[in-house]
Image (cartoon, grey):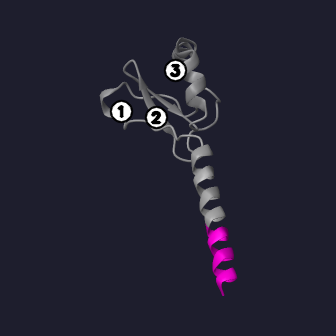
Amino acid sequence: MKFFALISSVAFLFASCSKQESATTEAPVETQAPVDASAAKPYPLKVCLVSGEELGTMGEPVVIVHEGQQIQFCCSHCVPEFKEDPAKFLAKLEELDKP
């Protein structure tokens, strides 16, 4: 009986250690503050500025406001690429929005 209790305790100890280890190795989740897009100039396109994918095909579009302009992306993976060179994408937005 004591042997069974000892084995159970050791198994529980290893199980709890592995859970703590996996919790510390996970990458932190990037969160964004809610965006008040109503105060910004509306996004005029129906496609992602970075990938060209139609908005809504990969879930709910990701919306940010950059210098008073609302920008929409097909997914969160496009946001860092936009932030690397926003001037390039804002020029693309102006070009695509011409009547």
Mark found first going from the N terminus, 3 or 1: 1
Q: CA distance from mark 3 to mark 2?
A: 18 Å
Residue holding disc 3? 97
Labelled disc at residue 89: none
Percent x, y of residue 42 = 40, 28
**Magenta includes 8?**
yes
What amino acid does circle 1 point to? Ala
On screen, residue 96 above or below 34: above
Residue holding disc 1? 37
Mark found first going from the N terminus, 2 or 1: 1
Residue holding disc 2? 63
Percent x, y of residue 85 = 57, 15
Q: Is label 2 in contact with label 1 (beta carbons under 8 Å)?
A: yes
Name the residue at the bottom extreme: 1
Element assignment for label 3: loop
Q: Classify residue 8 by image quadrant.
A: bottom right
Whether residue 57 can be seen here:
no
Q: Residue at x 56, y 44 (%)?
A: 56
Q: Is residue 40 left or right of residue 88?
A: left
Percent x, y of residue 79 = 55, 29
Element assignment for label 1: helix
Q: Is the residue marked by circle 1 packed among few (<14), some (14-19), or many (20+) residues within 10 Å?
A: some
Q: Is the residue marked by circle 2 packed among few (<14), some (14-19), or many (20+) residues within 10 Å?
A: some
Q: CA distance from mark 3 to mark 1?
A: 19 Å
Q: Classify residue 76 by image quadrant.
A: top right
Element assignment for label 2: strand
Mark found first going from the N terminus, 3 or 2: 2
Q: Is residue 67 left or right of residue 17?
A: left
Percent x, y of residue 1 = 66, 87
Residue extent of the magenta highlight: 1-12
